[in-house]
Image: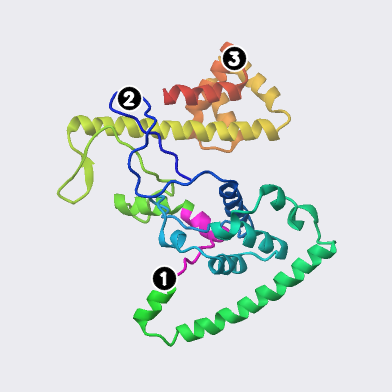
Amino acid sequence: VVKCFYISESNKRNGSLPYLPFESVVRHESFDIWAFGVLIFEIFSKGCTLFPTNKRTGHLSSYDAIYTWSSEEAKRLVYTHTEDPLAQDLLLQLLSPYEERQSLRMATVLEHPFFTDYGATSENAKLIVEERKIDCEDYRRMVPCENSKTNTLSSRETRSTNHRGPTLPYMSLDAKLHMLHAPSYLMREMLGASNNAPNVPYSLIILPYKLVRNSNKKLTPATKKDVERAENMGKQMLGLSKICFFVKALQRMMEENKKASELFRRWMDRCGHYPKAVAKDICLLLEIPEAYMDIASTVVVTAKEKDENPVHVARGLILGNVR
């Protein structure tokens, strides 16, 4: 489904569309049914998509897969990536080509045993389950035979054969976590960090200055002013990280320690006379280094002056650091 909002030179919406490189189609209920099928497939295949996209650009990996879509291709993907017989039967109807799907209505779809007969207790549901189990087993037995024949082809023919249909990537939880943390590894490599570099979540950062290559081929700020700006920015980011860590430790302690509120009340009474001792006691209770004593002292003093919850005061420091 393609939406096109054509704006003329006068910035007014024009009733006529510009030339399109494809024929427009009239909206139809079968489009919604197809989209519903794509969603159901992704759920039952544990995250696979019918048409994989490039993770970096978001573009489709193969437009040919859409153009050459067929019932056989739908069967291949459904039987390969789903196990529930009723879901398989439903998906084969939802993901059939437009010519076969255009007479299907959503009211009919919702009457399918997949939605109406949980547990497949009716005779109709039992027949569907039995039929799909047999068909799926036959298909899966047939696939290894075809693969063995394919292996006898030349390497060039094999590449051509394998390219006919997309292989849907199924990633385990470990693989997804690995991809999630991949930017950390990539950024370490780009910045030339050593193996002893701190294990922190790197990401892409927009810097307010230009980077150039120095004599050692390392990226550095271009001018002295930019170096000072980089140092200040680094201090702010480290300070923000430090405050966030303190807030997390403080919030955890307030939730787990039933006497936390009483302890803070005592500290607020003592902070005027023994600020360092109070800050040190807070760090000991939170099990954090004494390097956080300055934050602890600021929080307890401000909480006393404003008579506020220490956690709220600490969160306010985060906002102040961001601004």
Q: Amino acid at mark 2?
A: Asn
Tell me which label, 2 or 1, sits earlier in the chain: 2
Give the label, 1 or 3, closer to the camera: 1
- The answer to whether mark 2 and mark 3 are in CB contact below 8 A is no
- The answer to whether mark 1 and mark 3 are in CB contact below 8 A is no
* Residue 138 higher or lower than 26, as above or below: below
Q: Which mark is residue 11?
A: 2
Question: Disc 2 to disc 3, how far (Cα)?
Answer: 58 Å
Q: Left of 49 or right of it: where is 254? A: right
Reply yes or no: does residue 231 show up in magenta: no
Q: How is the image coloured?
A: rainbow
Q: Are there few (<14), some (14-19), or many (20+) residues within 10 Å of tag 1?
A: few
Question: Disc 2 to disc 1, how far (Cα)?
Answer: 45 Å
Q: Residue furthest bottom?
A: 152
Q: Amino acid at mark 3?
A: Lys
Residue shown at 58% from the left, 52% from the top: 34
**Residue 254 image position (x, y, % from top left):** 66, 30
Give the label, 2 or 1, closer to the camera: 2
Q: Which mark is residue 304?
A: 3
**Residue 97 image position (x, y, % from top left):** 55, 60
Range shown magenta? 163-179
Residue shown at 44% from the left, 39% from the top: 3
Q: Nearer the viewer, residue 303 or 59?
A: 59
Q: Which mark is residue 163?
A: 1
Dot 1 falls on a residue whose secondary structure is loop
- The answer to whether mark 2 and mark 1 are in CB contact below 8 A is no
Q: Left of 53 or right of it: where is 123? A: right
Reply yes or no: does residue 164 show up in magenta: yes
Q: Which mark is residue 276?
A: none
Residue shown at 37% from the left, 85% from the top: 154
